[in-house]
């Protein structure tokens, strides 16, 4: 399981003074989705309202670590990567934090293309160029037998909160959106299709199949090797896109990738 507890910005503060809890800030290739392969600065906030058992950013959810950074301090670090035109604001769940809107406003003013990676349970009005939404399926629930904390305490809360149809529809209607489902196998597809039906029934905009991406579950090369072929075949069979996890292929589970 990837860990990044090596936070080197000992910045005191809190959300009250507009700061954001930042877990990682780094430059890499976007690994997932329609922009896979695009050089991007990643701003990873800490804190999540869910607890997927397979979370690949464990230190933003199960054991959150962070430094409190002002929007200006984040901007200073982002703009230091002079070659970057894309910024990915990710988490954890970045839309939990009020301060993320000011950050997105500031990035937009500077002309960056901003992707926000979200679980789709929170809507915010902000300049988002691509909402990369990963709605969580039943396969994500930390049942007692697969709970990393070992106590099953999050299972009911996660199960109750993992889909918010109203927020999801607001996001889909407002932003260019990709819906990226973490898939473990064929048993997940009926749930994907049922959720898509609910979103399509409720949304005032079309949700085409090529905005739907199936992504193999797996945060390590070994685990991806077990899931990706099956998920690729499911994408072919159902007419959805397949998305790789390029950063895992390239760097396995190394932090800051
Ligand atoms: S929603 Fe994302 S960040 Fe939150 S626990 Fe699940 S995988 Fe981790």
Image (tube, rainbow, N blue to C red):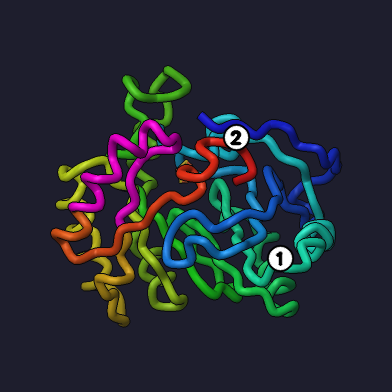
Give the class, few, some or many, for how many residues have Cα within 10 Å of label 1's Cα (few <14, many ≥20): many
Q: Is the magenta stretch mostly helix, strand or loop?
A: helix
Q: Position of residue 219 (x, y in %)?
A: 44, 38
Residue at screen point 83% across, 42% down: 9
> Disc 2 beta carbon < 8 A from ligand 1?
no
- Residue 176: give x, y in percent of width and height: 44, 76
Q: Mark 1 points at which residue?
A: 103
Q: Where is residue 194 in the image (x, y as percent from the top left)?
A: 18, 58
Q: Where is residue 158 in the image (x, y as percent from the top left)?
A: 39, 39
Classify 168 as above or below 10.
below
In the image, the segment drawn in magenta is 214-233
Look at 44% across and 34% down and name the residue there. 220
Seen in the picture, residue 240 relative to 190 is either above or below; the reply is below
Would you say 122 lies left or right of 187 here?
right
Residue at mark 2 to residue at mark 1: CA–CA distance: 21 Å
Where disc 1 sits, the SS reads helix
């Amino acid at each position: 399981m990837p860990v990044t507890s090596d936070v080197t910005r000992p910045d005191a503060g809190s959300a009250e003074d507009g700061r954001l809890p930042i877990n990682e800030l780094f430059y890499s290739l976007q690994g997932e989705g329609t922009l896979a392969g695009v050089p991007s600065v990643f701003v990873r906030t800490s804190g999540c309202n869910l607890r997927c058992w397979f979370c690949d950013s464990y230190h933003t959810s199960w054991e959150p670590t962070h430094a409190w950074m002002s929007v200006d301090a984040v901007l200073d670090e982002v703009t230091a990567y002079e070659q970057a035109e894309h910024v990915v604001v990710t988490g954890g769940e970045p839309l939990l934090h009020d301060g993320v809107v000011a950050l997105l406003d500031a990035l937009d003013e500077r002309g960056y293309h901003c992707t926000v990676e979200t679980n789709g349970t929170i809507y915010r009005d902000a300049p988002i160029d691509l909402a990369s939404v990963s709605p969580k399926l039943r396969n994500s629930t930390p049942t007692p037998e697969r709970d990393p904390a070992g106590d099953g305490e999050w299972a009911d809360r996660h199960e109750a909160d993992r889909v918010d149809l109203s927020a999801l529809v607001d996001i889909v209607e407002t932003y260019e959106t990709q819906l990226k489902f973490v898939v473990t196998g064929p048993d997940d597809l009926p749930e994907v299709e049922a959720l898509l039906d609910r979103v399509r029934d409720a949304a005032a905009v079309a949700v085409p199949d090529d905005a739907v991406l199936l992504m193999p579950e797996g945060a390590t090369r070994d685990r991806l090797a077990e899931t990706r072929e099956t998920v690729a075949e499911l994408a072919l069979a159902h007419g959805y896109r397949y998305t790789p996890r390029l950063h895992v292929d390239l760097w396995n589970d190394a932090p800051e990738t």
